[in-house]
Image (tube, helix red, strand yellow):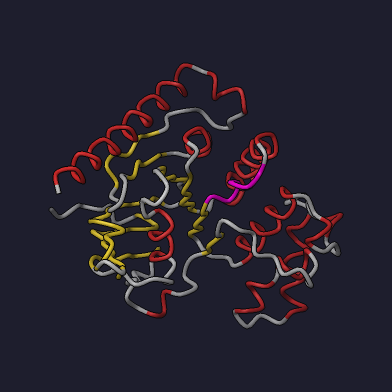
Amino acid sequence: MAVNHPPEAALIVDRVSKTFPDRSGSVDALNDVNLSVGFGEFFSIVGPSGCGKSTLLNIIAGLEAEDAGSIDVGENGASSRDESRLGQVAYMPQKDLLLPWRTVRQNAALGLELTGVKASIAHERADTLLQQFGLARFADAYPATLSGGMRQRTAFLRTVLTDRPVMLLDEPFGALDALTRRAMQEWLLDVWSEMQRTVLLITHDVDEAIFLSDRVAVMSQRPGTLIHTHPVDLPRPRTAEIVTEPAFMEIKRDVLRDLQSSMSLNEGLNASQ
């Protein structure tokens, strides 16, 4: 069934499917995924492990090719089959991937340098944001001396400095302890509210998704497909206390119900095959 996507969307995923070869034949990773994210929107996808969330981000970023469907980013209308889509979005993977021999400033500027910007200019651009990202004191420090939160801030600064309108975040705080993770979530909201970039986040953490987002979509077990999207009608700015409020708990209950339903549905389908 065709899906009508709004023309003003910053990111459109239209009926995307993906299958990988396997020793026993093939594995269906994604099936008919449809998604529209508006300009300046914070959109999250939650789903069980192995459901294809990271595969979807890789396809959007141009690192993987879809088997069916198409992806448009911003005003470029660039298809995911077009090699020129590489570099059209900013992508922060699960691991920070900081280079140990480069300082915070040099790591942050790496993305710009890879696009051909002179190192001196890239470092100047990094310096303009180090204070805002809470990294000014650590500009000349090496990754081994940083806390997990500081490493993630550096990786996020590198992502922001690529200056792309759409940012993909793949479990950016998954490796952090609970207190640091919550602090990083609040910090991310502050940065996002100032920069108003379009963000697509994938996570296993339902609380994180609701706390950060304007909308939260639930992905089924493999083959992954988006089964329902929940609006998050909570006021901004948000603080940690909001997770205990009745409106937050109601959204969480609905999302968890859909997650449980999607898992039960897939188990039934697998048992019938």
Horizontal side, residue 238 vs residue 224: left or right: right
Task: Tell me if residue 175 is in the magenta stretch.
Answer: yes
Q: Tell how many labels.
A: 0
Horizontal side, residue 220 vs residue 39: left or right: left
| Chief SS of the magenta region | loop
**At which x and y percent is residue 93?**
55, 59
Which residue is rendered at x = 43% and y = 45% of the image? 43
The stretch in magenta equals: 171-176
Quarter-of-image position of residue 140: bottom right
**At which x and y percent is residue 211?**
52, 34
**At which x and y percent is residue 139?**
83, 61
Q: Is 106 placed above or below 35 here?
A: below
Q: Is 125 placed above or below 235 here?
A: below
Q: Residue furthest front?
A: 24
* Residue situated in front as seen by the camera: 92 or 135: 92
Quarter-of-image position of residue 268: top left
Horizontal side, residue 271 vs residue 90: left or right: left
Task: Tell me if residue 219 is in the magenta stretch.
Answer: no
* Residue situated in front as seen by the camera: 238 or 185: 185
Which residue is rendered at x = 42% and y = 27% of the image? 252
**At which x and y percent is residue 166?**
48, 59
* Residue situated in front as seen by the camera: 50 or 5: 50
Horizontal side, residue 130 vs residue 71: left or right: right
Which residue is rendered at x = 26% and y = 35% of the image? 264
